[in-house]
Image (spheres, grey):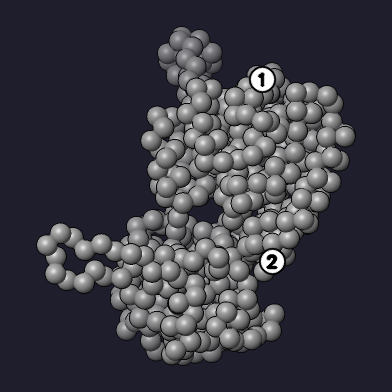
């Protein structure tokens, strides 16, 4: 997949010009893009003060406008995201953009509580933090901005985004389009802001800025650790390595289709996507046969080794002082292949396949790096085990304690329950593709910030609020 930088620049320039031409004159045209972190934070702070004066009903009008703008531009943003980052599938990113627009909760998520009795009335309401710093990933450059933008504004906050530099134009255009929608709906300019040139230095400055009240990081372990060490309230959405377990009671054909659909969705970029399959041996051959029927290409023998040499890089390991044993090999994912099409990946080892092939499957031992590492590409290792107990034990091991997502295909309620209790993941999907866990084909709201490390789980507007208690003694109790 070739990244057409000229196309990205052209699209970004056209959209930015169109947005700015229609906006009233403000410090940044209201579009939210500034040269410095200080400017971006100051503008967001001013916007949040204006937002606080609006009614909940008006806030919901702004959110409705944001939803519409995201839906109207879902295709444009998907095309930009794939072209700029070189990762993912346009058709799937369109689904994700629309999902974020339509299934991210709004102000209805903010529930008040009250107690009344002999000594009066106590009321708890959910109030905003103020200005939130939101770090977004290259894997979901528009989706995370849409989702967090809606949720954080619904909660009464303004947002300073720190987009990943490799998808900055997609994220910045998304911010501009959403700000345009907010202003047209009668809201304040610059509720969503960012710097024009995102960088690690800019992100660090944003995290340390005294006027940032809360930090939300969607990304890998390093960025989550960074926000958690800043001394501010932090929400961290970290990595996962979701196993898909299949036992002998499952509907094997449906399981095969669901697994391929889930693992190939946006070329396996979603952190919830199936990263390895663990199957009871008695049904393994049948499962892999059906997988091939539904878009998988099976490789074996030397082809597996050749593929490993392409999509993995060996990490240099230093032997401990005085140790005579040879250091154990360890591997990292070759980022050049993250989110690439299965067809492209196979072509790198001399195998030509049609566009209908959406995933590569191969049988491997449990300790293979394809199983241990989170590949984030449509390459799916399949591991056979003797029974469900062995499957559960291995699933817990290879999930690495991330407690992110697990998937299981079974008709045995006891088996489903045993895995759910053992693995303790934030999302547990039963008898469906992994993406059902974020509302695609399943019930419930969506989010693109799944906070396992800090415990919030699937974030929603209430995640971006703090409790405020109001107590009136000896009054307003009418019973």
Q: How many C-alpha atoms fall within 10 Å of the one at disc 1: few (<14), some, or many (≥20)?
A: some
Residue 314 lies, with reference to residue 17, above or below; the image says below
Q: Position of residue 273 (x, y in %)?
A: 53, 65
Q: Quadrant of residue 112?
A: top right
Q: Position of residue 232 (x, y in %)?
A: 43, 29
Q: Position of residue 368 (x, y in %)?
A: 36, 76
In the image, 13 versus 215, the foreground residue is 13
Instruction: State the residue at coordinates (55%, 35%).
Output: 202
In the image, 353 versus 470, the foreground residue is 353
Instruction: State the residue at coordinates (61%, 69%).
Output: 340
Q: How many marks?
A: 2
Q: Residue furthest left?
A: 322
Q: Quadrant of residue 130?
A: top right
Q: Residue under label 1, please give it.
A: 46
Q: Are marks 1 and 2 in contact (CB under 8 Å)?
A: no
| Tag 1 secondary structure | helix
Q: Residue under label 2, please give it.
A: 2
Q: Which mark is residue 469?
A: none
Instruction: State the residue at coordinates (58%, 86%).
Output: 350
Q: Earlier in the sequence, mark 1 or mark 2?
A: 2
Q: Position of residue 286 (x, y in %)?
A: 49, 90
Q: Is residue 263 left or right of residue 397?
A: right
Q: How many C-alpha atoms fall within 10 Å of the one at disc 2: few (<14), some, or many (≥20)?
A: few
Instruction: State the residue at coordinates (84%, 46%).
Output: 14
- Gap in angstroms between the C-alphas marked 1 and 2: 41 Å
Q: Is residue 313 visible?
A: yes
Residue 391 lies, with reference to residue 235, above or below; the image says below
Q: Quadrant of residue 317?
A: bottom left
Q: Is residue 111 visible?
A: no
Quadrant the N terminus occupies: bottom right
């Amino acid at each position: 997949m070739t990244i057409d930088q000229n196309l990205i620049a052209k699209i970004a320039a056209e959209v930015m010009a169109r947005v700015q031409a229609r906006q009233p004159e403000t410090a940044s045209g209201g579009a939210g893009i500034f040269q410095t972190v200080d400017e971006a934070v100051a503008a967001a702070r001013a916007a949040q003060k204006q937002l606080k004066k609006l009614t909940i009903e008006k806030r919901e009008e702004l959110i409705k406008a944001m939803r519409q703008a995201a839906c109207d531009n879902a295709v444009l943003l998907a095309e930009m995201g794939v072209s700029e980052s070189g990762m993912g599938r346009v058709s799937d990113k369109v689904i994700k953009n629309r999902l974020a627009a339509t299934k991210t909760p709004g102000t209805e998520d903010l529930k008040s509580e009250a107690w009344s009795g002999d000594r009066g009335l106590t009321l708890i309401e959910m109030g905003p933090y103020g200005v939130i710093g939101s770090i977004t990933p290259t894997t979901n450059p528009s989706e995370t901005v849409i989702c967090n933008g809606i949720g954080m504004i619904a909660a009464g906050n303004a947002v300073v985004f720190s987009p990943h530099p490799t998808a900055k134009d997609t994220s910045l255009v998304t911010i501009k389009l959403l700000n345009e929608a907010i202003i047209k709906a009668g809201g304040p300019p610059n509720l969503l802001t960012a710097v024009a040139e995102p960088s690690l230095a800019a992100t660090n400055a944003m995290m340390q800025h005294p006027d940032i009240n809360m930090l939300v990081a969607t990304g890998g372990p390093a960025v989550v650790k960074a926000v958690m060490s800043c001394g501010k309230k932090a929400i961290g959405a970290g990595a996962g390595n979701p196993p898909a377990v299949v036992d002998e009671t499952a509907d094997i054909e449906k399981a095969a289709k669901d697994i391929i659909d889930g693992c190939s969705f946006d070329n396996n970029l979603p952190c919830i996507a199936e990263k390895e399959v663990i199957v009871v041996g008695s049904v393994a051959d049948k499962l892999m046969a059906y997988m091939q029927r539904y878009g998988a290409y099976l490789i074996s023998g030397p082809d597996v080794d050749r593929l490993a040499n392409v999509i993995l890089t060996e990490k240099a390991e230093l032997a401990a002082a005085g140790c005579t044993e040879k250091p154990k090999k360890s591997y990292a994912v070759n980022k050049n292949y993250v989110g690439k099409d299965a067809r492209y990946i196979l072509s790198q080892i001399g195998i030509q396949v049609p566009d209908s092939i959406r995933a590569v499957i191969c049988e491997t031992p449990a300790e293979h790096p394809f199983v241990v590492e989170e590949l984030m590409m449509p390459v799916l290792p399949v591991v056979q085990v003797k029974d469900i107990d062995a499957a559960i034990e291995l699933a817990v091991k290879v999930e690495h304690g991330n407690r992110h997502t697990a998937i299981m295909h079974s008709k045995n309620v006891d088996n489903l329950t045993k895995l759910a209790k053992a693995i303790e993941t934030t999302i547990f999907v039963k008898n469906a593709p992994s993406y059902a866990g974020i509302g695609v084909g399943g019930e419930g709201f969506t989010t693109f910030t799944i906070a396992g490390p800090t415990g919030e789980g699937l974030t929603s507007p209430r995640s971006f609020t703090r409790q405020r208690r109001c107590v009136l003694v000896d009054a307003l109790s009418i019973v």
